Amino acid sequence: TQDRPLAGKRALVTSGPTREAIDPVRYISNHSSGKQGHAIAAALARLGAEVTLVSGPVTVPDPAGVKIVKIESADEMLAACLAAGAIDVAVCAAAVADWKAAHPVTAKIKKQNGVPPPRLELAPNPDILATLSKPGPTRPSLVVGFAAETENLIANAVDKRKRKGCDWIVANDVSPATGTFGGERNTVHLVSAEGVEDWPTLAKEEVAVRLAVRIADHLGRPRPA
Ligand code: PMT
C-alpha cells in the first residue's frame, strides 16, 4: 500500500470545458484543454484510486487506467458525476460554463439581410462543485475545487471555498499572460480551512502528482470521531 495509498478509494475528476449549444452549429465554451484535470485523474489512478474522469470535449489523450465519461454540456457533466455513485474524493478541475443559452434551437439560426442580430439570452447552469459539496450522508470525504481568476486571486479563492462548500480550492491565475488555460505549466495556491499554501510554478503533471499525494495523505488520516 506504500506506493498505492489510494487503493480501495474511489475518485471523481471533472476536466476540460463544457459546450453549451446555441443552435446545432454554434456553442458557448472556453479555452480549457483538459491538461490539468486529465493529469490529476492519471496521478490519482497511479496512486491506486479507482478513477472516473468526466470530461468535456478535449483533444488530449485519454489517461491510462481511468474510466472516462465524455460529455458536452454542464447538465450532462452533472448527470455523469451523479451517476458515478459513491466516491471518496471529488476534484472539479473542469471549466464549466456558468451560463447556457436559455432557448437553444434545433435548426440553424439564419442570417437574413436587414434583420438585426439575434439577442442571446442566458440561463444559469447547475453548479457541479457546489452540488457535490452539499452536506449529507453521500458527500465525499474530500471535495476539491479550482478557482480560475484574473484578479484578486487569493481573496476570491478563499471566498469561493466558503460559497461552494468544498474543502480545498486550488487557485490559479488564468490571465492570458500566464498561459494557464491550455499551457503546460501552472502556478497554484492550495486554499483550505488551515490557510493558503503557495506552490511554485510546476508542470501540470507535477501539480497533479503533488495534489494526489496530498489527497492520499488526507484520506489516510484517521477520521476524527
Ligand atoms: O484545462 P487546462 O487548459 O489544463 O486549464 C486548467 C484550468 C485553468 C481549466 C484549471 O486549472 C481550472 O482552473 N479549472 C477550473 C475552471 C473554472 O471554471 O473555475 P471557476 O473559478 O469558474 O469555478 C470554480 C469551481 O467551480 C471549479 O472547480 C469549477 O470546476 C466548478 N464549477 C464551476 C461552475 C459550475 N457550473 N460548476 C462547477 O462545478
Image: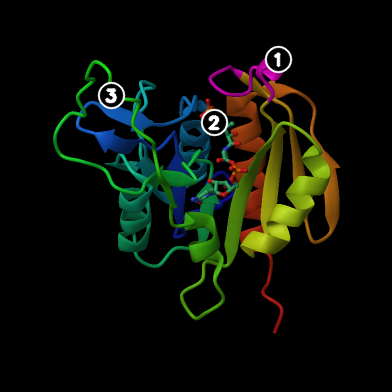
Say if 54 sits above or below 205 in the image. below
Give the percent coordinates (x, y) of residue 139: 51, 71
Taking the spot 53% from the left edge, 20% from the top edge, the residue there is 182
Give the residue type at disc 2: Gln
Q: Which mark is residue 177?
A: 1
Q: Is residue 150 magenta?
A: no
Looking at the image, is mark 3 or mark 1 earlier in the sequence? Answer: 3
Split into quadrants, the picture shows ligand 1 in the one at top right
**Left or right position of 214 against 193:** left
Name the one closer to the observer, 88 or 79: 79
Disc 2 beta carbon < 8 A from ligand 1? yes
Q: Which mark is residue 12?
A: none
Q: Nearer the viewer, mark 3 or mark 1?
A: 3
The magenta stretch spans which residues?
A: 175-184
**Left or right position of 181 against 53:** right
- Is residue 120 something that shows in the picture? yes
Badge 3 marks a residue whose secondary structure is loop
Q: CA distance from mark 1 to mark 2?
A: 18 Å
Residue under pointer 2: 36
Give the percent coordinates (x, y) of residue 122: 42, 46
Name the one closer to the observer, 118 or 136: 118
Name the one closer to the observer, 156 or 219: 156
CA neighbours of label 1 inside 10 A, class few (<14), some (14 to 19), many (20+): few
- Please state, as top left, top right, bottom left or bottom right, where the C terminus lies in the image: bottom right
Q: CA distance from mark 3 to mark 2?
A: 43 Å
Q: Nearer the viewer, mark 3 or mark 2?
A: 3
Name the one closer to the observer, 116 or 111: 116
Q: Is residue 182 magenta?
A: yes
